[in-house]
Image: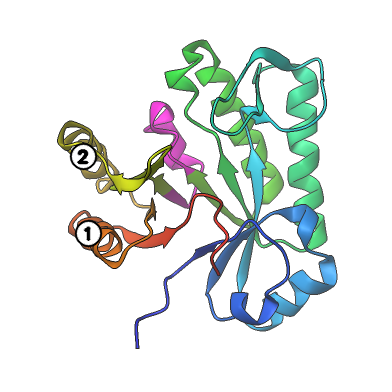
Amino acid sequence: MSEQPPICFYYGDKHLDELATYPRVVLQPEFYSPQELAQLADQGVQTLGYLSLSEDQGPPAPWQRQERNPDWGGAFVEVGHPLWVEHVIGQARDAMAAGFAGLFMDTLNVELTYPEDVPHLLTLVAAIRTEAKPGYLLANRGFGMLPRLAELVDGVVFESFSARWTDEGYGPWPADVLEFHAQIAEQLLQLELDLYALDYADTPGLTDFAMRRARQFGMQCVVSDRALSRV
């Protein structure tokens, strides 16, 4: 019997019985009621509510940029826009009030698209830290904010550390990207944080590759599909 992964990233709904087998789960807040979150908590599950910090899937709003994420279609945002800050902090507050034990912060790689937003993003993460206390705060990547980010969060997820999805299907990163990711992973090992790898694979061979490589760099690995629909 394979060992249950230490965390589940699940962006669907329901499946409470399966979710209850994990110590920690990342969920979309709109899909789970306070009663369902309490049910999971009673079974020892730490639930983390999803937050997007630099992209918005919602209707047109004053904080949105014209550019959109080509993979998911969401609008990039001006991270420092006061109304966006208010919007995200409100989402964080609502998630914690609903019964989430912490928060998962996604879309943190603004250093690759809008590097001028990095200081605003750090300010936003610090504000979310305040809302989440004493809950658990997990960041997806956000390497452009290190080492300051490490002072604000409890763990880091290295999404797509070894394996990825493309228009042609799932596969490993090219050798040069794997080497670059390894260099970042070695930096992460110097920090006192929980470290996870979240990889995408659809075959046993690619899954095994991702799991083995994550262990080499001190990370616990979770393998899922592009839509994070596996429980």
**Circle 2 is placed at which residue position?**
178
Q: Is 167 in the magenta?
A: no
- Work out whether residue 167 or residue 24 is closer to the camera in this orientation and state it: 167
Q: What type is the residue that disc 2 sits on?
A: Leu
* Amino acid of disc 1: Phe
User: Which stretch is magenta?
Assistant: 140-156
Name the residue located 70 percent from the left edge and 82 percent from the top edge. 42
Above/below status of 116 relative to 51: above
Q: Residue at the spot x=81%, y=60% of the render?
A: 98
Mark 2 crowdedness (10 Å alpha carbons): few <14, some 14-19, many ≥20: some
Q: Residue at x 42, y 41 (%)?
A: 150
Task: Provide the secondary structure element on which disc 1 rests.
Answer: helix
Q: Element at badge 2?
A: helix
Q: Is residue 12 left or right of residue 156?
A: right
Give the answer, above or below, for where 77 lies relative to 191: above
Residue 194 in percent (x, y) is at 39, 57
Q: Residue at x 69, y 54 (%)?
A: 28
Residue 85, quarter of picture: top right
The quadrant in which the N terminus is found is bottom left
- Figure quadrant of the C terminus: bottom right
Label drawn at residue 103: none
Marks 1 and 2, how far apart at CA: 12 Å
Of labels 1 and 2, earlier in sequence is 2
Task: From the image, tell me which residue sits under label 1.
Answer: 209
Question: In the figure, residue 213 lies in which quadrant?
Answer: bottom left
Give the x, y percent position of residue 65: 68, 13
Residue 111 pos. (x, y %): 44, 20
Q: Is residue 224 above or below residue 78?
A: below
